[in-house]
Image (cartoon, grey):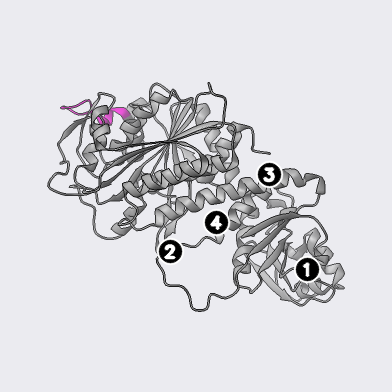
Amino acid sequence: MEFSIKSGNPEKQRSGCVVVGVFESKKLSLPALLLDKASDGFIATLLRRGEMEGKSGTSLLLHAIPGINSERVLLVGLGKEKDFGDKEYCLAIKTAIKALKQTQAQDATLFLTELAVRKRNTAWKIRQTASICSDALYQFDQFKSPSPNPGRQLRKLALCIQNANERAQAEEALQQGLAIAEGMALCKDLGNMPPNVCNPVYLAQEAEKIAKEFSLECEILGPDEMRELGMHSLLAVAAGSHQPPRLICLHYKGGQPDEAPIVLVGKGVTFDTGGISLKPGAEMDEMKYDMCGAASVLGAMQAAARMALPINLSIVVPATENMPGGGATRPGDIVSSMSGQTIEILNTDAEGRLILCDALTYAGRFNPQVVIDVATLTGACVVALAGIASGLFANKDGLARELLEAGEEAGDRAWQLPLWDEYQELLKSPFADMANIGGRWGGAITAACFLSRFTKEYRWAHLDIAGTAWKSGADKGATGRPVPLLMHYLLQHAGKSLN
């Protein structure tokens, strides 16, 4: 898809389709009014006849309107004007792209970007539009036979702005949006990849490709190096698999040489059977998505490097499979972690925290200013928040607020849950420093409490994306979340949010 920024009158645009908005009660937006005036009231007449009410999520495609240069006009419902905010704007963009995909138009001019959105400027609208459009057009068809009749596809999209003086900022916002979309696409590609292809070695190779493209420092550790470092918790998860584990590190240095880095840690279980604590067979195929934390931090690293953000950023990805086998870790085993703390493993399906604890300890050697881990960690978080919000935990409330605000700005929301000391009591073990599970209740919280024991030396946050990393059912697939949240946090930190 080729994007561009332009300004001009909608009735004069020569394109496959011009897209304008209509509020509820059939109220035309300003671009729609200009089209209506040029067509001698053609659009208003159709609306009076009841062809469209302007409700959110609706659209109406019109052909060959007199007085209009464009081949088609797409009317998109915006809902009530007084309620038009972030959610309504993003829905309008998604509705427009869905409708455009069903036409034969190869290019379109979008005037929805001229709409006023509460508390948002042109840069936010352009960035969100580029990201949403690219995301909506994403397809994972690498393993499908080519379609014999692919048809004409939308290839060019012009995003219109009212004030030509804002072009430079709009162009920068467009590049940011496209970089975020590219990071999301990488995240989704890795998540959707079948587990017989996307194993720990494959993830390491993908990281090496990113490092080569953007001249990043890359470090890949294997089992021998992990053993020397005392990462016996991570190795315990890998013990049942024939695939060797990897610890993947990438370093982007766009900030000052002495500036402490932001470190993103991503859970990379490329397939999770549950180990000896075997999962039920139903929907086990979706456990290929258990590496979406790793995929998201790789996507964020690629996006940050693409934008050339003035920050120092590192990622750490512990990558392994969790398989049953003769050498697999058993419930009741006790292992030591890189930190020296010992862990009684009561359930081998609580493996994400076992690989993350060693990765979080390893992250401390970079003297980070902040560490954020991302993991499809607990089914309990899905029960609590469904697929709407990611679970957020932090050892500093200021950091939690920054991430919550980034999620709101990105439309990739999170919700903070407590890390109170009372929950730590649930992790007590009579035989080791801690157990790897805390019982039936509060599972997302006790998992975060477990991780917090390895992050006391720095500012830390944990994102549980078990409910938001992928969708099931007819629309099965990785979502690319929380790449947008992470990138808006990094943009704010770099002073490049343009808002």
Amino acid type of disc 2?
A: Gln
Q: Which residues are magenta?
A: 424-436
Task: Give the distance between the C-alpha atoms of the residues marked 1 and 3, in whole angstroms.
Answer: 25 Å
Task: Give the distance between the C-alpha atoms of the residues marked 3 and 2, in whole angstroms.
Answer: 31 Å
Name the residue at 64% across, 47% down: 175
Which structural element holds mark 3?
helix
Amino acid type of disc 3?
A: Glu
Which structural element holds mark 2?
loop
Task: State the residue in front, 368 or 482.
Answer: 368
Amino acid type of disc 4?
A: Asp
Q: Is residue 386 left or right of residue 341?
A: right
Return the x and y of residue 78 as percentages of the image width and height.
Answer: 68, 59
Q: Nearer the viewer, mark 1 or mark 4?
A: 1
Q: Give the tally of numbered discs.
A: 4
Residue under pointer 2: 142
The quarter of the image holding the C terminus is top right
Query: Is residue 14 at least partly visible in the picture?
Result: yes
Task: Give the distance between the C-alpha atoms of the residues marked 4 and 2, in whole angstroms.
Answer: 17 Å
Task: State the residue in front, 205 or 116.
Answer: 205
Residue under pointer 3: 172
Amino acid type of disc 1?
A: Arg
Residue under pointer 1: 14
Q: Is residue 337 left or right of residue 213?
A: left
